Image (cartoon, grey):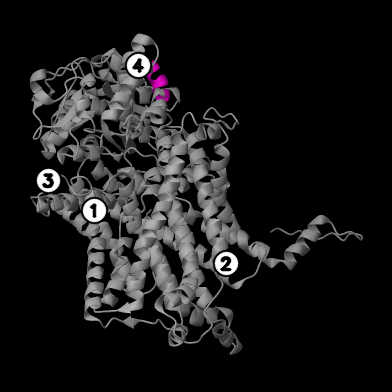
């Protein structure tokens, strides 16, 4: 803000003085300005550019032609895609809930041998790199998949008992990757139930179902609604599963990709705008709903009421269910590893691969491109994470500790990229930065190294902001006050008190963000160039040549990398999970 | 004496000019050369290595991607070209690229060995490999005599739910094939209607449309479907190099032959290196190398048959296509197919 010296004037203060005084009274306006420049410039502006683009034809005329074409009943491909996507998303919510809620009850409410380990391993689907893992699913449950064909061989059936394909196939993959949201929300809600209330109700003669209805469910509902909205939003934007399993069906996220492939940018912009609108509506719903759920337990010393299962039969049943659940959850990863051991050309119509060897891994070691791709992925992820960490921390600080009028705008803008699928973020960036702007220091960003880290950054700012925000919210303000009262300077207090307290939370959020960008696929496929080709694109190349073995080997390396990061943060073995299914 | 001086001055000048121009030539061909290619990873990687040996000052960067994707990117980057060359892709795509003004004309020395139908009259792009479309099957499960020999035989109801097809809107080669199927009727009637009818019957036999090319290989190899349609050289590649039991038949009545083209991008950053690369991959030696090692059928008319791989000894009857009209109409046809025919005939 450049402020000139005021000229002495008569009675009426000039407008700019009024404005200056207004700014002085509202210092948050200019303090938050740099953040809004980022949020508006790199998130809102590209989105709006795409929206504007959708009102122009490919010939550059202003018209509603694209929308007319989209909603044209004579050419129903787009409408069909819209309804299929919505239907699939709704079904995904039901399927994910059907898996997540019972598992959460089983592992959080009851104790039996191994229950603790199970409850921690249940997050395995989080380590699920896109695309290649969908391939693992096809090899596992698809037509000629190992499980259906194995069952067919075992029981001498004429046909495989079931196969995973088309819509049900995509649905199962969605349930597999997204049940974790229901699991997390449910188990968090269960842990919140004050055991003493439950016990009091029981002592007063309340039966299991009565207590369920009157105590547990009311506490559960907000979490479940939140999870439902979240899963719906992720499922409607899903790309990898429809890409490989879509078959004859249409999906909105695929239509965007196909339109862009066919050079019809106007239609791509229109489809992207419609998809974005749906996502934003859901984002606002989630935000509205999470503000409603302001009711907390008032009792002190909340502790999870864990029921130990004493009945030996019930114990066995619980253990069997857990083991089956874990086997099913880890099979795709095991399959991925299995495929990585199969040399090209050896596995044809046999149920299981007849030959195993390390040849694919050896090939990768000899291939310098792999090392480059790993390096590119790690470098870009780190750049994006560091940038997002700085931005996210400042945003979270403002959101958590300050009151200001534009708070809602900051919150919504920050969360926006989280609702937008990678395809749309990529399209937005292409449309906005295909010409020099001052935001990009008068450079054209499309086709350069930096566009991909920027896409990653935009995508993970919400993730980091949320986790840092949570840390700030938990930070006891009296700590800071005590430090200040004892005469500590602000920076000293920050360095010695605040920073050590928030570090673990911030670090785990950052590593989670790092993980989600290491495997990023949907933005990468549209934005990468020779200088920044990431791992997921190397995998795609190998797949394109039907070199499934080497592709799976790379996928396995990716899984190992991601799992290592998760283990380091302790997320895999303890703590709350909040970021699962980040790929879809 | 004076004459001698003159001679010396002349010689010195000559040497100087030569030296300067030599230096200039060497100096011009250096730096980075970026190639968007639809030829996958290995072959461009190999050619990159050879090229860099010839021009040590040049670093070649190869970005494998789908042909459509390459065109898309070049279009998106029009104001700031990131690549110098698009290598691979069908004629109609290059016609579009030329019309949108993203190509740079260049007449290479091998111009005379490329038949007119496989190059641009104004030298904006050159065909390099013949890529015929074919009917694909698993020859460990099916006898050659049972395999359809002609496109029309694919419509036989006995193949219901037996044909696996790459989703044509996502693949340059399949777009060409689908449009060519319509073209056969359009050329006679001036309307695509009979072509649409033909595609309806094919759709009734189609088991699934997959977005990814490898899934059709997998479907055939693992006996999930019996038949497919795909480019012939890629099938030979999978057959001879990866050892999969895949084989293909080229319909005798005529098949669309994609001339895999090469072109230089307008306003590219390294025009000299781009020209040198076009020359280099167009040589007889390069063509022979790519034929043997990478299953590409050279377009060059002066390749001695005896030196070519035996599987290339095939009869190709190119479908008669007016590629400019084809490029113009094809998007409309495919959009109609996508909206009104795809998966609606079960």
Viewer-nearest of labels 4 and 1? 4
Per the model, the C-alpha gap separating discs 2 and 1 is 43 Å
Q: Which comes before the other along the chain, label 2 or label 3?
A: 2
B247 up-or-down from A197: above or below: above
Q: Mark 1 lies on which chain?
A: A
> Would you identify the image quadrant in which residue B92 lies?
top left
Residue B41 in view of the camera: no
Viewer-nearest of labels 4 and 3? 4
Residue A157 in view of the camera: yes
What is the secondary structure assignment of the residue under circle 1? helix
* Boundaries of the magenta span: B324-332
Are dots 2 and 1 on a single chain? Answer: yes
Examine the structure image and report whether residue B326 is included in the region drawn in magenta.
yes
- Disc 3 marks which residue? A347
Per the model, the C-alpha gap separating discs 4 and 2 is 59 Å
Per the model, the C-alpha gap separating discs 2 and 3 is 54 Å
Viewer-nearest of labels 2 and 1? 2
Q: Residue at x 50, y 51 (%)?
A: A279
What is the secondary structure assignment of the residue under circle 3? loop
Direction right: furthest residue: A11
What is the secondary structure assignment of the residue under circle 4? helix
Task: Say the numbered circle drawn on residue A554.
Answer: 1
What is the secondary structure assignment of the residue under circle 2? helix
Q: Which of B296 and B336 is in front in this view?
A: B336
Q: Residue at x 15, y 41 (%)?
A: B222
- Disc 2 marks which residue? A291
Per the model, the C-alpha gap separating discs 4 and 3 is 41 Å
> x, y (%) of residue B73?
40, 36
Q: Which of A214 and B173 is in front in this view?
A: A214
């Amino acid at each position: 803000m450049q402020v000139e010296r005021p000229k002495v004037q008569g009675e009426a203060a000039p407008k700019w003085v009024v404005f200056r005084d207004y700014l002085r009274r509202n210092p948050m306006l200019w303090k938050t300005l740099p953040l809004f420049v980022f949020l508006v410039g790199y998130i809102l502006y590209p989105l709006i550019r795409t929206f504007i683009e959708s009102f122009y034809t490919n010939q550059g005329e202003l018209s509603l032609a694209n929308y007319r074409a989209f909603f044209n009943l004579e050419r129903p491909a787009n409408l069909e895609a819209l309804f299929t996507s919505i239907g699939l998303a709704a079904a995904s919510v039901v399927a994910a809930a059907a898996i997540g809620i019972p598992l959460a009850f089983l592992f959080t409410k009851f104790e039996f041998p191994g229950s603790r380990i199970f409850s921690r391993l249940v997050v395995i689907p989080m380590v699920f790199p896109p695309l290649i893992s969908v391939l693992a699913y096809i090899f596992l449950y698809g037509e000629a998949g190992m499980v259906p064909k194995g069952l067919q061989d075992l029981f001498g059936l004429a046909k495989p008992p079931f196969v995973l394909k088309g819509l049900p196939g995509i649905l199962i993959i969605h349930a597999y990757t997204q049940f974790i949201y229901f699991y997390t929300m449910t188990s968090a809600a269960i842990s919140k139930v004050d055991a003493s209330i439950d016990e009091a109700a029981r002592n007063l003669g309340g039966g299991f179902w009565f207590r369920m209805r009157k105590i547990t469910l009311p506490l559960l509902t907000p979490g479940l609604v939140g999870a439902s909205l979240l899963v719906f939003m992720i499922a409607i934007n899903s790309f990898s599963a429809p890409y490989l399993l879509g078959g004859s069906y249409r999906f909105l996220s695929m239509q965007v990709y196909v339109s862009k492939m066919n050079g019809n940018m106007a239609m791509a912009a229109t489809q992207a705008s419609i998809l974005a609108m749906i996502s934003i509506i859901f984002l606002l719903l989630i935000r509205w709903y999470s503000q409603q759920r302001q009711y907390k337990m008032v009792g002190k010393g909340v502790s999870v009421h864990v029921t130990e299962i004493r009945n030996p039969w019930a114990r066995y049943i619980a253990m069997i269910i857990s083991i089956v659940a874990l086997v099913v959850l880890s099979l795709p990863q095991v399959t991925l590893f299995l495929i990585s051991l199969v040399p090209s050309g050896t596995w044809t119509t046999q149920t299981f691969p007849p030959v195993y060897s390390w040849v694919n891994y050896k090939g990768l070691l000899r291939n310098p491109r792999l090392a480059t791709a790993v390096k590119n992925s790690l470098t870009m992820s780190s750049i994006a994470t560091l940038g997002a960490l700085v931005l996210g921390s400042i945003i979270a600080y403002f959101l958590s500790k300050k009151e200001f009028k534009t708070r809602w705008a900051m919150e919504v803008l920050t969360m926006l990229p989280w609702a937008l699928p990678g395809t749309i973020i990529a399209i937005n960036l292409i449309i906005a930065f295909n010409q020099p702007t001052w935001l990009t220091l008068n450079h054209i960003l499309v086709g350069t190294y930096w566009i991909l880290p920027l896409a990653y950054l935009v995508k993970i700012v919400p993730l980091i902001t949320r986790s840092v925000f949570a840390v700030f919210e938990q930070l006891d303000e009296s700590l800071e006050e005590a430090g200040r009262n004892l005469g500590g300077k602000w920076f000293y207090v920050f360095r010695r008190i605040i920073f050590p307290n928030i570090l673990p939370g911030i670090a785990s959020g950052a590593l989670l963000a790092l993980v989600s960008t290491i495997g990023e696929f949907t933005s990468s496929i549209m934005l990468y160039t020779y200088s920044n080709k990431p791992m997921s694109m190397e995998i795609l190349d190998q797949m394109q040549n039907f070199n499934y073995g080497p592709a799976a080997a790379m996928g396995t390396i990716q899984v190992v990398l991601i799992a290592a990061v998760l283990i380091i943060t302790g997320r895999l073995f303890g703590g709350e999970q909040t970021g699962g299914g980040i790929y879809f | 004496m004076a004459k001698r001086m003159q001679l010396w001055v002349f010689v010195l000048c000559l040497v100087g000019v030569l030296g300067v121009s030599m230096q200039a030539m060497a100096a011009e061909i250096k730096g980075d050369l970026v190639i968007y290619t639809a030829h996958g990873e290995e072959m461009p990687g190999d050619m990159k290595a050879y090229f860099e040996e010839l021009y040590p000052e040049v670093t070649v960067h190869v970005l494998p991607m789908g042909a459509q994707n390459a065109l898309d990117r070049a279009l998106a980057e029009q104001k700031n070209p990131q690549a110098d060359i698009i290598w691979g892709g069908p004629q109609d795509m290059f016609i579009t690229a030329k019309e949108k003004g993203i190509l740079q004309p260049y007449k290479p020395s091998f111009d005379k060995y490329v038949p007119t139908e496989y190059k641009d009259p104004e030298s904006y792009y050159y065909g390099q490999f013949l890529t015929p479309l074919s009917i694909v099957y698993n020859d460990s499960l099916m006898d050659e005599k049972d395999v359809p020999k002609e496109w029309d035989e694919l419509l036989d109801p006995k193949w219901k739910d037996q044909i696996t097809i790459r989703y044509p809107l996502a693949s340059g080669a399949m777009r060409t094939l689908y449009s060519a199927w319509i073209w056969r009727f359009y050329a006679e009637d001036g309307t695509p209607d009979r072509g649409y009818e033909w595609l309806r019957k094919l759709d009734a036999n189609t088991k699934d449309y997959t977005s990814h090319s490898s899934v059709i290989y997998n479907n055939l190899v693992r006996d999930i479907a019996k038949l497919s349609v795909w480019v012939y050289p890629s099938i030979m590649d999978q057959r001879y190099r990866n050892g999969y039991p895949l084989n293909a038949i080229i319909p005798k009545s005529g098949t669309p032959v994609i001339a895999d083209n090469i072109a230089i991008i307008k306003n590219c950053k390294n025009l000299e290196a781009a020209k040198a690369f076009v020359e280099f991959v167009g040589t007889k030696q390069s063509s022979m190398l790519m034929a043997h090692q990478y299953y590409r059928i050279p377009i060059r008319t002066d390749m001695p048959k005896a030196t070519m791989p035996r599987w290339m000894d095939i009869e190709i009857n190119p479908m008669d296509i007016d590629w400019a009209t084809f490029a113009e109409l094809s998007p409309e046809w495919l959009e109609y197919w996508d909206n009104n025919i795809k998966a609606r005939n079960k």
